[in-house]
Image (cartoon, rainbow, N blue to C red):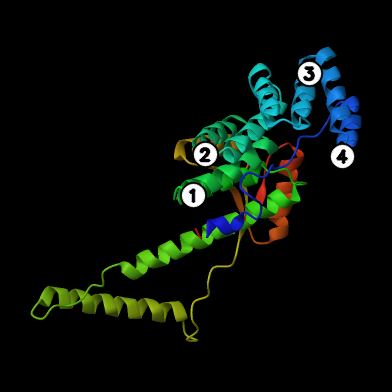
Amino acid sequence: MLGLAFSSPIGAQGGAPPIADASLRRARALAASGDLAAARAIADSVAATGDAGRKAEALYWSATWSEAPATARTKFIRVAVEHALTPIAAWAQLRIAEQDVELGDRAGAQRRLERLVRDFDSGASAYGGLLLARLQREQGRTLEACTTLDSSRVRAPPDAVELVNQLAYAARTCELMASRAQRAAADSAPAITNQPGNADTSRQSANADSASTTTRATARGATGASPTRPARAWSVQVAAFATLAEARRLASRISERGHDARVTTDRPFRVRIGRFATRADAVALAGKLKAEGNQAIIVEAERP
């Protein structure tokens, strides 16, 4: 089912970093018009004269506009290794992983994507998480795939509409699978039956039935109405982790800033803030968090 969440081929390139340099923006226009050679020439010129950050950006785009995959890979590796501390390095890692998939090296792609998702918090890591989750799903590692998708959702740039939609769809599929698994576990639980001649069991069952009847009657009250279900509540989710310790550390830092943060009980361990009666209240908090540079998505709160 999780495979349905991915509408594009597994090796398809995802997203692209913004271009800060004016010369490279002109080069991108040339590339868009089909003149890759001219675009690449400009990028190579910038790479030869720029400072470290500008050089890394130019080298990345020179690789992007290279017609030979081997040449492009060499340049992407240079960006990832020689300019590992620059923001563009994450995008270079993503491009290399995509090439690995196209070349059939899924194990190599997975190792690179795992490092990308672990070490970077950017749009590139969100795109990488989408690809990594697909590889994990191919191996039957569904829980890990859903954990990866949860982490990627809070990293996805809001303006990356297609990515946000794919991640949201995949997350809904994960929730559906979890719900079905819970129902299956409940259905397979052994029923307690009374065996003939077992007086203790019979008395226990009778007492339980009587207590249950009393509880139901109390819940209905004098009017005979059935108890109402708890009202729907909304939360703001800021992260999801594979380990409980990581989630608790983040929740503690958020609580120190005055927010009502908590960690959900099941893997992936999601860090959430508040239980709001209306979605608008959750949206307002999410907007405030995003304005402060944090990641935040609106989710339906789990039952307390």
In-front residue for pair 34/264? 34
Label 4, secondary structure: give it.
helix
Q: Which mark is residue 12?
A: none
Identity of the amino acid at label 2?
Answer: Arg
Label 3, secondary structure: give it.
helix
Give the mark nearer the N terminus: 3 vs 1: 3
Question: Disc 3 and disc 4: Cα gap in Å?
Answer: 21 Å
Question: Disc 3 and disc 1: Cα gap in Å?
Answer: 37 Å
Question: Disc 4 and disc 1: Cα gap in Å?
Answer: 34 Å
Residue beneath disc 3: 55
Residue beneath disc 2: 106
Query: Which residue sits furthest left?
Result: 197
Give the mark nearer the N terminus: 3 vs 4: 4
| Whether label 1 touches label 2, CB < 8 Å | yes
Question: Disc 3 and disc 2: Cα gap in Å?
Answer: 30 Å
| Whether label 3 touches label 1, CB < 8 Å | no
Identity of the amino acid at label 1?
Answer: Glu
Identity of the amino acid at label 3?
Answer: Lys
Residue beneath disc 4: 32
Identity of the amino acid at label 4?
Answer: Ala
Looking at the image, residue 161 sits to the left or right of residue 131; the answer is right
Give the mark nearer the N terminus: 1 vs 2: 2
In-front residue for pair 197/180? 180
Label 1, secondary structure: give it.
helix
Q: Position of residue 83 (x, y in %)?
A: 69, 19
Question: Disc 1 and disc 2: Cα gap in Å?
Answer: 10 Å
Residue 26 at least partly seen: yes
Residue for point 78% across, 24% down: 57
Q: Position of residue 109 (x, y in %)?
A: 55, 35
